[in-house]
Amino acid sequence: MSEVSAAVAIEPKAWGGGRSPFNVSYGKMMMWFFLLSDAFTFGAFLISYGTTRFFSSVWPDANQVFKSFPFMEGQNLPLLFVSLMTFILIMSSVTMVLAVHAGHYGDKQNVIKWMLWTIVGGICFLSCQAWEWTHLHSEGGWWGSFTDPSTPVSSFAEFFNHHKDSVVAALPAHGLQATHDFFNYFFTITGFHGFHVFSGVCLNILVLVNTVNGVYTRRGHYEMVEKVGLYWHFVDLVWVFVFTCFYLL
């Protein structure tokens, strides 16, 4: 045996494989890394939105922009519809927790049941968002809208709070730009979040199919349910910040 071979043979190993010293699987660790990087992206969007709003003389009022409800046109119901959307998404996070809990006990039937309800919740949320986007588009809001300097104030005045004299006075000079910025940010950020919800629904459907086919039963664990659960909870958490920035503040 050469000296090099002998040195390699007696060199102690800090970790010889098997159970990770971090007590977490490679897949879950990579999911946490992805969520961290995604959090930075959403954070950059929201910081940019907050900065633009802070330096604007006037800004659309959420109570005026989001006051409609399906099949109840003409009624002044500020933030009621988005509150329903938020409730649906939060409940889908609860059903995901129950699916993960069932997976820890190898309860295939309950994993199927709660994953199915999570998917239904995600689809309902996306349907609500599609209605909201369609409604705002019918009112003139969209990417790149409200850029024509000749646009009359009456075209965007409905989005502002007319009970404040300072707002009314600033509308002719700054209202058009503020409305343009608001809708650009709104459709970009909620669209980016909606894409995450759609991706989560697709992942949940894939996991549901694998569960029905007994893939995770044969593996002996339901870790994949837990990993997509982390993603789904992240999507729900991000919505809390989006909801706060656009609808409450």
Image (spheres, grey):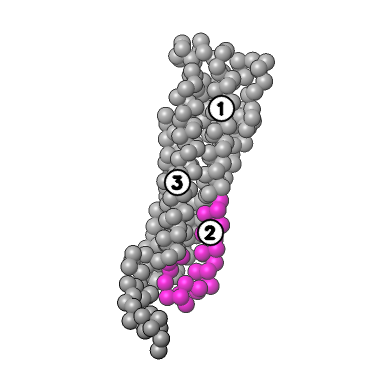
Q: Nearer the viewer, mark 3 or mark 2?
A: 3
Q: CA distance from mark 1 to mark 3?
A: 22 Å
Residue annotated with mark 1 = 181
Q: CA distance from mark 1 to mark 2?
A: 33 Å
Looking at the image, is mark 1 or mark 2 earlier in the sequence?
A: 1
**Location of residue 216 in the rendering, given as x and y in whole percent from the top left corner:** 47, 72
Residue annotated with mark 2 = 203
Residue annotated with mark 3 = 39
- Residue depicted at x 40% and y 89%: 1
Question: What's the residue type where badge 2 is placed?
Answer: Leu
Q: Quadrant of residue 128?
A: top right
- Residue depicted at x 32% and y 77%: 12
Q: How many numbered discs sit on the rendered protein? A: 3
Question: What's the residue type where badge 1 is placed?
Answer: Asp
Q: Is residue 80 visible?
A: no
20 sits left or right of 155 in the view: left
Between 151 and 24, the residue placed more toward the observer is 24
Looking at the image, is mark 1 or mark 3 earlier in the sequence?
A: 3
Taking the magenta stretch, the answer to whether it contains residue 8 is no
Which SS does the magenta portion mostly show? Answer: helix
Is label 3 in a helix, a strand or a loop? Answer: helix
Q: Nearer the viewer, mark 1 or mark 2?
A: 1
